[in-house]
Image (spheres, helix red, strand yellow):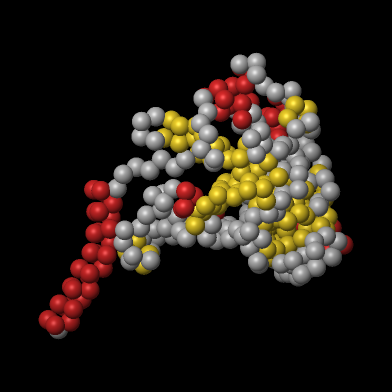
Amino acid sequence: MIRFSKILLYITIILLLFWLIPWGYGFIFSKPQKNPFILYSTVINDFAILENNGKGTERKDLKGKYYTESEFDSILPMFYYRQLIADERFPEEINGVALSPKIAQTENFIFRHQPSDVNCKKPGLYPLLESMSGRVDLKMPDDVFRINNNGIEFIDIKTNSIDEKKSRIYTDAMKKKGFCFPANIIAGNPTARKDYDEGYLITDRTGSLYHLKQVKGRPYFRKIEIPNGLKIKYIFPTEFKNRKYHAFLTDDKNDLYVLYTKTYELKKSGIPHFNPQKDEISIFGNIFDWTVSLSNPEENKIYALDAESLRLLKQIDLARLYPDIQQNNFPVRLTFTSLSDKYVFPRISM
C-alpha cells in the first residue's frame, strides 16, 4: 500500500512539473510580442506592413520601402478612408473604379473566426427573426425553433409549448422544396444587433443546401444549387453591410467558398486550405481586395485575394518573415485549456 502511494505521488509530481515548469518559464522569461499589422495594398500591389521595432513605429512594404504616416494612409485608402476624408485626400477613383466615402464604408468588412467557435456544444434551439418587419431595428422573436426527424418545431419561450400551426406551415413549406429531415447543419446569426436579417442556411440529411427566413410572418424557403460532389462541412453567415456576400462555407476538403446573396452563386476562393476546427482566420475585405490571415500551431500565413474573382494575388509566410513570432521552448507540456475549444480538461501539448 505504501509502495502504491509513493508511485501515485511520483506520478502526480511529474504531471505537476509538466504543467508548472513551462508556465513558470513563460511567466518569468517571456516577453510581450507585438505582431505586425499587415494589409494588402491595391495601390502598390504589395503588402503594407505596420510594426513596432522597439524604438518606434515603422511603415513599409514587403520590398523594404519605408513610408511616412501620411504616405501609408494613401497606399491603404480603403482602410484609412476616414483619415483621408478628414485630410481632404480621399481618392475619387482607383484603377478606373469610381470611389466615394459611402462605398468605402459599405464595402469594407471584417470577418474573424477561432476554432473554439465550432469546437463547442450547439444549443439546438434557434430564434427566427422577422426579416421584413418594416422597422429599422430588428427584434428578437417570442419563440425558437428546432428541427428533428419529423419536421421543424416552433416553441413558445414563455409557455414552453409547441406552436402546432406555425410548425406545420413551415414544415410543409420545407417539404415542398424537397428538404429531407432532419437537418445536418443550421447556421445563422441569432442576434438583433445587426443591420438586417437573412435567416439561416441549412443542409438536410442528404447534404443539400437551403435558405430559410421569415418574411412578413410567412416562411421563405429556397433550395440553393451546389456543385455535384460538394460536401459542405461548415457554414458562416456574414450579413455584411454591402449585402453582397451571404456566407462563407467550407467543404470536406477544407476549401473555402463564398456564397453570394442575390444570385446564390457559390464561388471557390484562392485560399489553399482552411480547417475551421484548427485554423484561426481573419479577413479584411474591401471593394478591391481581401487580406486573409490564417494561423494554427504549425503555420502563420497571409494571403491577398482579388475581391471580384477571389483568385490568389500574393501570399507571405510570417513564420519565415518573423521567426520569433512562433516559439515553443518546451516540446511537451501539460495544459488544461486550449485556444481551439472552450473545454477544461488535462491535455498534453506537443
Q: Is residue 228 left or right of residue 20?
A: right
Q: Residue furthest right?
A: 176
Q: How many marks?
A: 0
Tell me: 274 left or right of 244.
left
Q: Is residue 106 left or right of residue 330?
A: right
Q: Nearer the viewer, residue 278 or 193?
A: 278
Q: Quadrant of the N terminus?
A: bottom left
Is 279 or 212 nearer to us in this picture?
279
317 shown above or below 206: above
Give above or below for 38 relative to 231.
above
* Spot occupied by residue 333 in the image (x, y as percentages of width and height): 32, 64
Whole-percent x, y for residue 204 in the image: 74, 65
Residue visible at 80% across and 61% down? 226
Q: Is residue 346 visible?
A: no
Provide residue 8's location: percent of width, then percent of height.
Answer: 20, 76
- Is residue 56 shown to the viewer in this render? yes
The residue located at (61%, 16%) in the rendering is 87
Whole-percent x and y of residue 9? 18, 73
Question: Residue at point 38% right, 66% down?
Answer: 350
Q: Residue at x 46, y 59 (%)?
A: 297
111 left or right of 306 in image: left
- Residue at the extreme left: 2
In the image, residue 208 sits, relative to residue 52, either above or below, namely below
**Quadrant of the rendered image containing residue 179:** bottom right
